[in-house]
Image: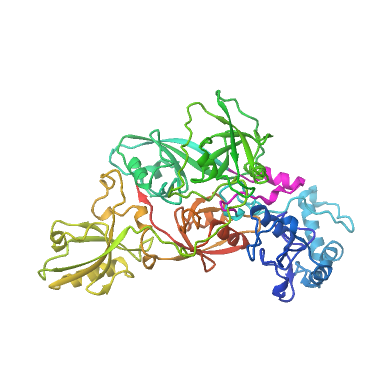
């Protein structure tokens, strides 16, 4: 516990207090939403906590309230009058069981050290645990003992880490691509220790899958593709009793990089499905698996085969321009590596850096034993030229420069964007997200014999795991709809003879279709799936009849009235991150895009909850709609939620391969 406030909180976060009375809103920091600590005034007339503003200004260059241009050097301490008013706020002793006293906030530390029986008991118990004495004997603590533990007690589990201190892919860090600014970078021994402890570790593995039936599906659902904001191909779900489940090495959240030696990290969703559905007895998959946070210190360089050393210089237009690079650590090799390049970002446009490059140094600073956080700090503080020295395995191909007109946005989980996000400037005519329409409405009216069946099978229903609308899984060669020819597999059924089907469960929809099929005339309203420009006509060759379902990418174009939103409530301790990364949001070049969950880190609250999945679309945070927000606006909103957050999401089933 903190010796100043008596409560558990991240070492570099503000102190926590239990205030006796409601505090006036004028004395509240609008970053942390708590009464001000060490208040700082901005030239534009707003006041924030010193630590809150300092951390915010490492990521952004504008005032959080009015978004006017701002630098930390322009801010100054609040007046003595304001500081005294804050210090005199009445707080309650945090040890309520042993002490019911109240006092001014400025007096709490002295109370804990000298007078509080609860804090004295806590220190005694802590000392007893740290220095156990045999046979139950133990020296009593010295009178007036004021020493406190160097490390706070943390909950069990692999994610018991200081909030907002992860290396990459953790949403609580909060840049335009989460994972850049790290509060652990204060120049203290504790800060340096945290940097060593909190790097996110990822591992690239080649997995060989064998199957006796050449046509047997692998049994996993995938999301993503370069034609979506997710960018990479990500495993959303592994089906029980499937080939992949029996193998046991692939898990939800894994990124599939290669299939049988073919790089699929930058292909469309349909192309990836085609590669993964290709029949064969053996399938070689290269996957990237995030292993959670590492507590180990950097290891010595391992011996390796000869590699090529390459010098690359990126020139930022200003200090705040992001580079668009995601850096990670690996479990089997020291140092930091390039995991991904943000499509459309400065590094991708330059075209000289490549995935899996190892970063030896940045601007002359040795990073051979470095961390993603250290690299991010160097990049962020660089005004213009960022000089990389990288190590590359022979034969690794450079990525091609990305054109400005690219439609992909893999923006989020970068740990080293190299500065604050580009300031979002919304175009007035783009106040909401306009989805690419994959559907067109149609009305089909047909005459039929009373005993003639419709001749279709359906899937979906609001009782389905994903709460899908009713869609056609097959049109049988018998029945009036096959003869008519206008209703096709994949069509979403809206109504039959004026009866709304969009809110029915599966059995209710079957009953409605059967009862209306007895009529002489039937009028169906439907949405037809338009062409996805899939290169392989055999994409769904193994999905026939009842087992068929549309590809994941087709659901993304559905109009919002067919979305089924659900609330997912996540809870965490003060020493944890939420444990997920996001992509999407407003960008000047691409307009408004939806936010998607890209990464869920093992051992974190999002991982343990099991409800959030990769590919889920975030619609709102604590009831506040995310539509029209930029990445740099949504991330701070998530950071503000200390112990509980409600995410409103839409979950579409991934494509089955």
Position of the N terminus, as image quadrant, is: bottom right
Q: Residue furthest right?
A: 143
Residue 598 x, y percent position in the rendering: 49, 51
In the displayed structure, 97 sits above or below 152; it is: below
Task: Determine the residue positioned at 50% across, 55% down.
Answer: 588
Q: How many labels, in total?
A: 0
Q: Nearer the viewer, residue 387 or 462?
A: 387
Q: Which residues are magenta?
A: 175-200
Q: Nearer the viewer, residue 355 or 238?
A: 355
Left or right position of 178 against 186 = left
Left or right position of 337 against 227 = right
Left or right position of 393 against 160 = left
Quick check: can you spot residue 382?
yes
Task: Determine the residue positioned at 87% across, 63% down.
Answer: 114
Q: Nearer the viewer, residue 163 or 68?
A: 68
In the displayed structure, 414 sits above or below 30; it is: above
Quick check: can you spot residue 330?
no
Magenta-drawn stretch contains 189? yes
Rendering colour mode: rainbow
In which quarter of the view is residue 298 placed?
top right
Residue 263 x, y percent position in the rendering: 41, 37
Left or right position of 69 against 121 = left
Q: Residue furthest left?
A: 449
Residue 374 x, y percent position in the rendering: 66, 42
Magenta-drawn stretch contains 410? no
Q: Residue furthest top?
A: 306
Residue 63 x, y percent position in the rendering: 66, 62
């Amino acid at each position: 516990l903190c010796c100043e406030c008596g409560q558990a909180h991240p070492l570099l976060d503000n102190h926590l207090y239990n205030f006796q009375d409601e505090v006036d809103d004028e004395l509240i920091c609008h970053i942390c939403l708590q009464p001000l600590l060490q208040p700082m005034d901005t030239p534009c007339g707003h006041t924030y906590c010193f630590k809150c503003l300092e951390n915010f200004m490492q990521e952004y260059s504008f005032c959080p309230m009015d978004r006017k241009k701002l630098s930390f050097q322009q801010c100054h301490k609040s007046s003595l009058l304001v500081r005294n008013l804050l210090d005199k706020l009445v707080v309650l002793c945090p040890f309520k069981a042993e002490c019911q006293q109240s006092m001014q906030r400025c007096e709490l530390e002295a109370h804990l050290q000298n007078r509080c029986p609860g804090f004295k008991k806590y220190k005694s118990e802590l000392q007893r645990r740290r220095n156990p004495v045999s046979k139950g004997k133990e020296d009593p603590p010295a009178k007036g003992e004021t020493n406190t533990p160097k490390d706070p007690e943390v909950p069990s589990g692999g994610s018991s880490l200081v909030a907002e201190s992860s290396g990459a892919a953790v949403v609580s860090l909060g840049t335009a691509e989460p994972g850049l600014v790290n509060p652990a970078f204060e120049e203290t021994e504790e800060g340096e220790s945290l940097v060593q402890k909190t790097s996110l570790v990822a591992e690239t593995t080649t997995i060989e899958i064998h199957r006796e039936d050449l046509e047997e599906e692998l049994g996993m659902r995938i999301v993503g593709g370069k034609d979506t904001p997710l960018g990479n191909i990500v495993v959303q779900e592994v089906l029980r009793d499937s080939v992949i489940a029996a193998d046991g090495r692939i898990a939800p959240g894994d990124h599939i990089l290669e299939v049988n030696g073919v790089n699929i990290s930058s292909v469309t969703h349909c192309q990836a499905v085609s590669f993964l559905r290709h029949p064969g007895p053996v399938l070689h998959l290269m996957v990237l698996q995030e292993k959670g946070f590492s507590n180990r210190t950097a290891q010595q360089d391992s011996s390796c085969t000869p590699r090529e050393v390459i010098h690359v210089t990126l020139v930022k237009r200003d200090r705040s321009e992001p580079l668009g690079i995601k850096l990670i650590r690996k479990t089997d090799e020291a140092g930091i590596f390039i995991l991904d390049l943000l499509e459309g970002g400065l590094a991708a446009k330059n075209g000289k850096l490549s995935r899996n490059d190892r970063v030896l140094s940045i601007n002359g600073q040795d990073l051979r034993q470095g961390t993603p956080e250290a690299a991010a700090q160097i990049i962020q503080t660089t005004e213009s030229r960022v000089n990389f020295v990288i190590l590359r395995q022979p034969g690794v191909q450079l990525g091609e420069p990305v054109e400005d007109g690219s439609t992909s946005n893999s923006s989020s989980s970068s740990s080293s964007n190299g500065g604050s996000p580009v300031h979002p400037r919304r175009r007035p005519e783009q106040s909401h997200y306009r989805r690419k329409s994959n559907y067109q409405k149609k009305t089909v009216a047909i005459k039929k014999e009373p005993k003639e069946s419709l001749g279709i099978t359906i899937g979906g229903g609001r009782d389905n795991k994903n709460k899908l609308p009713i869609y056609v899984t097959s049109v049988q060669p018998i029945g009036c709809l096959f003869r008519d020819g206008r209703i096709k597999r994949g069509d979403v059924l809206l109504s039959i003879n004026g009866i709304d089907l969009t809110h029915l469960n599966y059995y209710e929809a079957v009953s409605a279709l059967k009862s209306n099929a007895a009529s002489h005339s039937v009028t169906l309203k439907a949405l037809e799936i338009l062409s996805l420009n899939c290169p392989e006509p055999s994409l769904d060759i193994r999905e026939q009849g009842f087992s068929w379902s549309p590809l994941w990418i087709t659901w993304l174009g559905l109009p919002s009235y067919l979305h089924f939103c659900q609330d997912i409530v996540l809870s965490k301790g003060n020493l944890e991150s939420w444990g997920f990364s996001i992509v999407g949001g407003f960008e000047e070049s691409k307009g408004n895009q939806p936010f998607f969950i890209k990464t869920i880190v093992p051992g974190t609250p999002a991982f343990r909850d099991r409800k959030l999945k990769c590919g889920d679309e975030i619609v709102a945070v604590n009831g506040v709609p995310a539509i029209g927000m930029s990445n740099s606006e949504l991330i701070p909103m998530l950071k503000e939620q200390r112990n509980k957050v409600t995410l409103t999401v839409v979950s579409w089933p991934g494509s089955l391969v």
